Image (cartoon, rainbow, N blue to C red):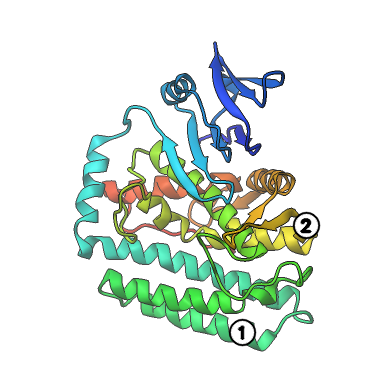
Amino acid sequence: MKRLGNVLYITTPEAFLALDGENVVIKKDENTSTRLPLHNLDHIVCFAWQGVSPALMGACAERNIGLCFLTPYGRFQARVTGKIKGNVLLRKKQYEVSENQKDSIPIAASFLIGKIFNCRKVLDRAIRDHSMLVDVEALTGASNFMKETLRALQLCTSIGDLMGFEGSAAKIYFNVFDQLILQQQADFPFNERSRRPPLDNMNSLLSFLYALLTSEVASALEAVGLDPYVGFLHQDRPGRPSLALDLMEELRPIFSDRLALSLVNRKQITGKGFTQKESGGILMDDETRKVVLAAWQERKKEEIMHPYLKERIPFGLIPHVQAMLLARHLRGDLDAYPPFFWS
């Protein structure tokens, strides 16, 4: 089982990373720097503009240390990878299935069934735990709509149909998402999902967490030998990690949405940590970003019972387990891909 490795998050915009022997050096100006041994790191995630030296990029690729670049908004930019590893037969099978819609549909449907099931769980838990604080009728109506959508997904015969049902379910889900914000409603209003750029504090937080999840899922797929850029649901596009976007669909409600709500409802972050830029987009400040990243890392340490494996694993290993199950299905070891159902 893959260990939960150490992740280095670079959130200071003026930071520059370089290689010095077997160490990564984080330089902020001529007089300040921090040194960390490379062998202690599993991933490096940069939210900085200054960049990384070519020597450090090469060292990360050689040592299989994930190196990912995101904008300060949390939008994915690029990943640095080394030589292609893994089972070439597995990747050939992946490409073959991705080109055949008939074979892709069951896998794509499983991703969306997992997503809508988990979105429904988020709503149902809010009804169960906070019935005096939420609009139970609105949340129940949204949950019932998703229940019907789950049935419809199993009958779809095209990717277009799947995307249509998913879009309708996502709209219903986000229409009631504001009901789940129990504290700081004035600082974290939510009317609709907005991206590129996010137009309110909650959307900024969600986009940031979705970007983190995309990076983790892409790493998990690469670790089992799959190509994160060739998917079954999202169309291929240059630079787009389509398979990572596919797999993260079922994980977004439990990894990102729940954490965003917890951070706001527990007042671990406040509206003061967000500023509006001239473009209208909302940007998270450095201190708030650090709080979110610390909470992200702590959440990954929590243990859960995996519904398919029937064994307890750290939350952070869920993407790796799901990537492994997807690889096993493509190899023919499993009749179908089993999505992750949160219980």
**Percent position (x, y) of residue 311?**
56, 48
**Percent position (x, y) of residue 212?**
55, 48
Residue 14, relative to residue 280: is it above or below? above
User: Label 2 sits on what residue type?
Assistant: Lys
Q: Which mark is residue 246?
A: none
Residue linked to disc 1: 140
Relative side of 11 to 310, left or right: right
Distance between the alpha carbons at the discs numbered 2 and 1:
33 Å
Examine the rendering and report whether any part of residue 89 can be seen. Answer: yes
Q: Looking at the image, which residue is at 49% across and 80% down? A: 147
Secondary element at image label 2: helix
Q: Quadrant of residue 264?
A: bottom right
Farthest-out residue, front: 278
Residue 267, relative to residue 11: is it above or below? below
Work out whether mark 2 precedes mark 1 in sequence or the reverse, and give the earlier one: 1
User: Label 1 sits on what residue type?
Assistant: Thr
Q: Quadrant of residue 223?
A: top left
Q: Looking at the image, which residue is at 62% across and 36% down? A: 9
Secondary element at image label 1: helix
